[in-house]
Image: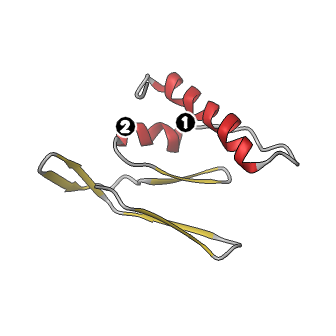
Amino acid sequence: MTCIVALTDGRKVCMGADSAGAGGSYMTVRADPKIYRVGPFLIGFTSSFRMGQPLGHNLTVASRPEGTDVFVFMCTTFVEAVRACFKDTDGCIK
């Protein structure tokens, strides 16, 4: 089980995550992060470390055009960039 937490005071955002890697009854402490800073984004992930690695090291997202709604931007431009990243990396997620 993964725990990722984000807190904001309205100006800054802080994120934290556990460092466990688990499968079945096996658990280990991992040195690689579950949170990455990618440009202006803080991205946390769960499940597959292989899925998180491209997000932290290969993801490129175009800037949000001024006046574009944040929700619309995240649902379109951001999601399409994530899909392209996974496709270009090695198909680590369908």
Query: Which image quadrant is residue 78 in?
Result: top right
Q: Seen in the image, is 17 located left or right of residue 71?
A: left
Please name which of the two marks, 1 or 2, marks the residue nearer to the observer. Answer: 2
> Is 5 placed above or below 81 here?
below
Q: Position of residue 17 (x, y in %)?
A: 40, 62
Q: Relative to the observer, which residue lies in front, 66 or 34?
A: 66
Other-residue count near label 1 (Cα within 10 Å), few / some / many at <14 / 14–19 / ≥20: some
Q: Position of residue 73 (x, y in %)?
A: 73, 42
> Is 16 placed above or below 77 here?
below
Name the disc covering residue 50, or none: 2
Q: What residue is at 51 percent from the left and 44 percent from the top?
A: 56
Q: Seen in the image, is 32 located left or right of residue 39?
A: left
User: How was the colour assigned to the protein in this rendering?
Assistant: secondary structure
Q: Residue furthest bottom?
A: 9
Q: What residue is at 66 percent from the left and 50 percent from the top?
A: 39
Q: Position of residue 51 (x, y in %)?
A: 41, 37
Quarter containing the N terminus: bottom left
> Is 24 placed above or below 18 here?
above
Q: What residue is at 73 percent from the left and 42 percent from the top?
A: 72
Which amino acid type is marked by label 2? Arg
- What distance separates the C-alpha of mark 1 from that of mark 2? 12 Å
Which amino acid type is marked by label 1? Asn
Q: Position of residue 8 (x, y in %)?
A: 61, 72
Mark 2 element type: helix
Mark 1 element type: loop
Residue located beneath label 1 in the image:
58
Other-residue count near label 2 (Cα within 10 Å), few / some / many at <14 / 14–19 / ≥20: few
